[in-house]
Image: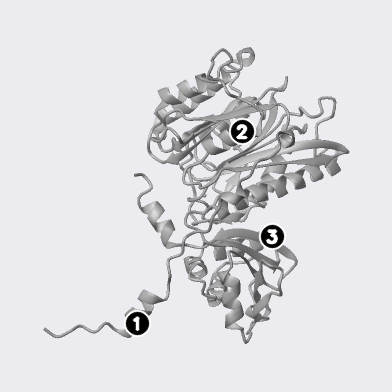
Amino acid sequence: MFPVRLPSIWKRFTSTIISRTPPPKAHHHAAIPDSVFPAGYVVTGLHCGIKKNPEQLDLALIQSISPQPAAAAACFTRNAFKAAPVVVSEAVLRRGDGRVRAIVINSGCANAVTGKQGTEDAWAMVRATDALDEEHAGDGATVVMSTGVIGQTLPIAKVLAGIQSQALSTPTRNLGSTFEAWERAARAFMTTDTFPKLRARNFIVGGREYHMAGMDKGAGMIHPDMGPPRVASTPAGSPSPSSPSSSSPAGQLHATLLGCILTDAPVSPRSLQSALTYAVDRSFNSISVDGDMSTNDTIIALANGAAAADAHEIDEEHNRGEYEAFRDELTAFAAELAQLVVRDGEGATKFVTVSVEGAATYADAHNVASRISTSALVKTALYGEDANWGRILAATGSVPLSVPLDPARVTVSFVPADGSAPLPLLVNGEPENVDEVRAKEIVSAEDLQIKVELGLGFEAAKYWTCDLSYEYVRINGDYRS
């Protein structure tokens, strides 16, 4: 028998890529002083039995304990297969005219594509959480979120028992306002996340100091496209409108992401919704791990006014300046939370900012950034630390724009995260004599920026993405087991 000689190309395919372990991520979570968290909320996380491991928390509760219900706003997935908790939460917000008292979240089961039983279970979670506030039990003032495996029903008896364990009369009640309580709640959000995503800060609007805290989860099935709740005339359970809001780019593949942002500032429900929609378009709707849209994506914001009971509500019609100051604080905070999701992307070894400038419209810039961020060729090149900028151009040129793209105006650069000089790759359509050693140094770093200038106008947008690794395939190849 003659020996078989492998072609030289086989050697190339088997020797150029080295499997890399994702970098440590625990440093993205740290203790926060109790005084930074917003007033008027108690929270907790616990294990109710959805997850097999009793050490893994799977149920979170958040209550606003201010005398009046909190203003509430939300942005929900535009996926046609909206999960039961999404449909139910939209109904709760409509019934309460944008005011609620609590949020309940479970992880380990998405309660999505679960038919009538799933809807009944979501409503049961609402009623059980309402009952924790004996004075307002039955008000239907709780919104609900779920994350985990799609197509499986909740072990609802276990979930309800977990909620009931936090009743005032029970010795197991551990709702609190300390960092430890907030951390428990953040951990209860987690599925394949490697660290709890929790942030808090103070800010000033109109000369008064307020506080804001946020928790989110997500590591895979991340490319969200969320919008405000459907109008009241839309029947519950019917598909959401297919067209995005005017400020959100159209026609995108968008993703499971859950998050909540809580503040003790007084904000009217309509202005909270307006601010949240603006913030989500520039944060959570601008991230991608794998380009896949979830059935459950939800971001909820509450504003209970507990820090200033005597202050007027922040409202965009009555005081535009205060509203814009609050909106911008919310947007910056949402962007910080959103970036944590990308940093914890399943198998990710890179955190990449895609910056598109010089577009005719914001939607054009956002669409180009999205296309680059979801390109499998770009993402695999980033994992391989290959400065293959031709793939960036191919992705850029594939996007229909409101003004036709002129390749002779396009400039592409790599921007290092260490503050050193950017590396031009293409300038006004002409390739540069690229220093390949320097290019390799930049793409080998954990953080980097891809900057694309279109030369068509003055609008800009950013996306945050990661690379695509062997580890991502391993995680998602056996997720249900």
Q: Secondary structure at mark 1?
A: helix
Is disc 2 placed on a helix, strand or loop?
A: helix
Residue carrying label 1: 9
The quarter of the picture where the C terminus appears is top left
Assess disc 2: are there few (<14), some (14-19) or many (≥20) residues with their C-alpha within 10 Å of its C-alpha: some
Residue 261 pos. (x, y %): 66, 38
Which marked residue is nearer to the observer: mark 2 or mark 1? Answer: 2
Q: Is residue 445 above or below residue 77?
A: below
For the N terminus, the image quarter is bottom left
The image shows residue 32, relative to residue 42, as above or below, that is below
Instruction: Give the spatial CA distance, label 2 vs label 1.
Output: 55 Å
**Local SS, label 3:** helix
Find disc 3 in the rendering and name its residue: 362
What's the amino acid at mark 2? Glu
> Which residue is found at the position 55% from the left and 53% from the top?
25
User: Does residue 165 appear left or right of residue 8 in this picture?
Assistant: right
Residue located beneath label 2 in the image: 180
